[in-house]
Image: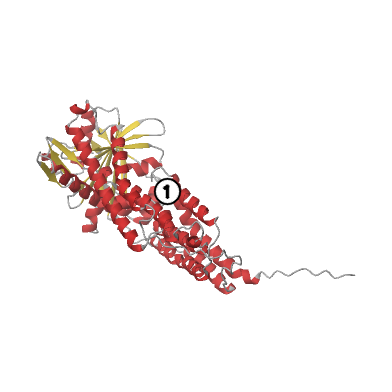
Amino acid sequence: MRLMLYPRFDLYPWFGPIGLLSGLLLLAAHPLVWLVETWLDPAYDSYGLWVAMLTGVLLQWSATSPVAQVNVRQRQFGLGLLALTATLRLLGQWLGINTLGAAALAVDVYAIGLLLNLNRRVRPLAPGWLAVLFAFTLPIERILQRGFGFALQQLSATGACVALQWGSAPVGCDGIQLQWQGQTVLVDLPCSGTRGLLLLLLLFVALSTLTRPTLRYAGLGALITLAAATLGNSMRIVVLAVGLVHREALGGADVLAEPWHSTIGLLTLSLSALPILLWARPGRGGMVPVSLPTISVNTPRLVSIKPLTGLAFLLASAGIIALPPQPVDVARPLPAPELPAHLATFTAQPGVLTAQEQSYFTRYGGGAARSAYGLYGLLVVSTTAPLRHLHSPEECLAGAGHTVRYLGQTGGPMPSAIYRSIDPQGRSWRIAVSYVSERGELTTHVAEAVWRWLQAPGTTWRMIQRITPWESPVMATEAFDVAVWLALDLPLSPSSIHPQPVKL
């Protein structure tokens, strides 16, 4: 009888790497699912999917080229960086902030770029800039709009005011409101330039990924991008204002209507991109050199991790995802707002919050109530944490299957942001929203509410949302708004002394 001998494969040394990779996958699963949901959810209006595809294409383009030189220390640093992202995910899980956990994915991309030696290949990329590029898959626009939208409004209005002062006609500048040649122009939140700023930053980061500029030259490029975005948006506002004043000379064309409005935006955005493209021209950026010795054939072992270390990391990862959230931006518990029992000739028919809404307000504080008054509807949300609770109708209604379009804002004593919403059944609704603080502050956008709340944390803010049928007579709609204002004892805006402005 012949004894057959087979080579013995020892799985024990692989327990460490397997534990590490399993733990990393466990930590990345929930943030990745949430991030993909933001790409597909119309409420976010995100272009993250396209950025993720661009990141993947660039990664594959570089990774499929030969390695010029393997750097073992760089790979080890990449693995250590993957382990450190667990801290970010711990904070995201503990604070109940999905964005933090998703931001750790960008760090993962950087670590993967180091592991693959992307900066040492025949077709090199900068791993750090590739990670920044992937960060644009996050809902950055919403974060920027909420946190800095009001400041960007002020900056854009100031730039447009300075540009208009170069002409012979006097210009009156009052915050985000401009008065020029008999026209009162309001720099509304969509004209703050947030989307244009992000698109130009995206262009700058994508070019930096390919060109690998030195730190000093990259800083110059960032300054050029910010300046181009600011000046470009101010230029767009000036062109729109000039078009409004000289409408007759343009054959009666309405520059605020399509396709003029979008065409002007695209042209000014293209002009703003030219300085960035000039900055990225070959030979102008102190590009980080890539040494190209003989191609390495024997790839060193990626990493050596003890089995107990890998098992400990896997158990720690399981503990992190099981950690109950303890968010810090929770509003103090508030009773549901009391809505009027009668409005005009209508008796209130109290509505019921959805199970998701009830769970949300139970977990994060605040309160909400809705009622129907005939064909009209009223929703009031009260909170001491606007960052967590307040949002525009574009977010919640779009998520419920509505097609929502922002139309601008009204002036007068009851300023409101106006939206047109078409529900899944094809019915059209007029949505009017105002945000009021307990200190009497009144605004039409969440960004300004958050800005003012940051100056006085703990202040209670209310969102007053009125829903009326789109075909309802204007006088009836205005009467309902007045009835809501009087019944809730809301403050009147001092801006009512000004003529109603044109919204850009």
- Which scheme is used to colour this image of the protein? secondary structure
Question: Can you say whether 241 is above or below 217 in the image?
Answer: above
Outermost residue on the right side: it is: 1
Mark 1 falls on what kind of element?
helix
Residue 78 horizontal/vertical position (percent): 49, 66
**For this rendering, which residue is in front, 431 or 280?**
280
Name the outermost residue toward the top: 251
Q: Nearer the viewer, residue 104 or 160?
A: 160
Residue 461, given in percent of the width and then of the height, sits at: 24, 51
Where residue 398 sits, quadrant-wise, is top left
Q: Where does residue 82 sit, x and y in percent of width and height?
A: 48, 65
Residue drawn at the location 31% of the way across and 36% of the way down = 262
Q: Is residue 141 visible?
A: no
Residue annotated with mark 1: 48
**Amino acid at dot 1:** Gly
Q: Which quadrant does the N terminus fall into?
A: bottom right
Q: Give the residue displayed 51% in from the left and 70% down from the top.
A: 76
